[in-house]
Image (spheres, rainbow, N blue to C red):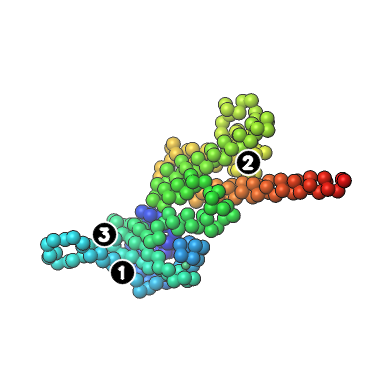
Amino acid sequence: MTKADYVNKGLYETVYEGDQRRRCVLEIKNDTASYRAYCIQCTSMSVFKAESQNVAQIHVPVVGHYETPKDDTRFYCDIDFGKRLHCAMCGMFMSVYFKVIGNKVVKVGSYPSTADLDRGKLISENSIPKSRIPKELATAIGLKAHGVYIGAYAYLRRVYETLIESARKKAEQDGVLAENFETMRIKEKIKALSDYLPEYMVETRDAYGILSKGIHELSEEDCKTGYDVLYNLIVLILEDQEERRKKELRKKDISNAINILNGKFSD
Ligand SMILES: [Zn+2]
C-alpha cells in the first residue's frame, strides 16, 4: 500500500479506500516524510516535515456543559486522528485531520485550510501578479478545496469566457471581428480570435468542450479526475497571456522612446 499525499488532498477527499485502512491509519500516524506545500508564514512554497509524535487523538473539551459528564469529558468532533507537520523554514505547524468512514480514510480538515494552501501555491508558483489572477480562478480553487468539482469546472470555464470576451472587444476595436462571430461555436470563436488569445489556448481549444461536458454531463468523480489537468492548463494560458501583456507594454515603451529619439536626431 502506498501512502497517499494527504497534505495536498482536498477536504473530504478519500486518502485511502480498501480493507487495509488500519494499516493506512498507522502509516499516516508514523509518517515522517516531507511534503511540498505553501507556508502562510513564509508566504512561499516550502517543505513540511511530518512529525511522528503527533496529535494521535484530538481532544476538544466540552464548553458550556452544565452536567458533569459520566465517563468522558471530551468529545471527538467527528475527527478520528490528526497529523502534525512543521515548516522546515520557519517551524510553523500544519495540522491535518482524518476520519475513518466505513472502509475509507477521509481528510476532514486542515489548518491552514486547503483553499489557503492552494491559493498560496497559485500565487507563489507562477508569473502572474496576484492582482491579475482572475477571481473566478480563486473561486474554482475554493470549490475544489471543498470537493465541489462540477462547481469548480463552472468557474474554470468562466475564466475562458472572460479571456474570449476581452479578445473579442480588442478584435472589434481593430475592426477585424468576423461578421458571423456571434453565431460561432466557442471552439470556432477561439480560432477566429487566435491573434488575440494566448497561442496555447488556441492549440488546446478542445478543453472548453471538456469543461462544458463536466458541468452538464459528468459526475463529481469524473470531474475530479480531470481537474488538475484543466486547472494547470488554465494557469499556463494565464501565464502566456501575462507574458504577452508585458511584452506589449515593453514594445509600446520602446516605440515611444524611438519616436522621441527620432525627433531629437532629425533636428
Ligand atoms: Zn514557513
- What percent of the width, then of the height, locates residue 122? 51, 55
Query: Quadrant where the N terminus lies?
Result: bottom left
Per the model, the C-alpha gap separating discs 2 and 1 is 51 Å
User: In front: mark 3 or mark 1?
Assistant: 3
Q: Residue at x 57, y 26 (%)?
A: 183
- What percent of the width, then of the height, locates residue 77? 26, 59
- What percent of the width, then of the height, locates residue 178? 65, 28
- What percent of the width, then of the height, locates residue 129? 56, 53
Please report whichever mark, 3 or 1, sits nearer to the chain's N-terminal start.
1
Q: Report the amino acid beneath label 3.
A: Cys
Q: Residues within 10 Å of mark 3 (few under 14, many from 20)?
A: few
- For this rendering, which residue is in front, 264 or 133? 264
Per the model, the C-alpha gap separating discs 2 and 3 is 49 Å
Helix, strand or loop at label 1? It is loop
Q: Report the amino acid beneath label 2.
A: Leu
Helix, strand or loop at label 2? It is loop
Q: Report the amino acid beneath label 1.
A: Ala
On screen, 224 above or below 89?
Answer: above
Please report whichever mark, 2 or 3, sits nearer to the chain's N-terminal start.
3
User: In front: mark 2 or mark 1?
Assistant: 2
Helix, strand or loop at label 3? It is loop
Q: Are marks 2 and 1 in contact (CB under 8 Å)?
A: no
Q: Which residue is mark 3?
A: 77
Q: Residue at x 18, y 66 (%)?
A: 73
The quadrant where residue 14 appears:
bottom left
In this rendering, would 106 be left or right of 182? left
Q: Which residue is mark 1?
A: 56
Q: Which residue is mark 2?
A: 197
Per the model, the C-alpha gap separating discs 3 and 1 is 14 Å
Q: Residues within 10 Å of mark 1 (few under 14, many from 20)?
A: some
Res. 35 in view? no
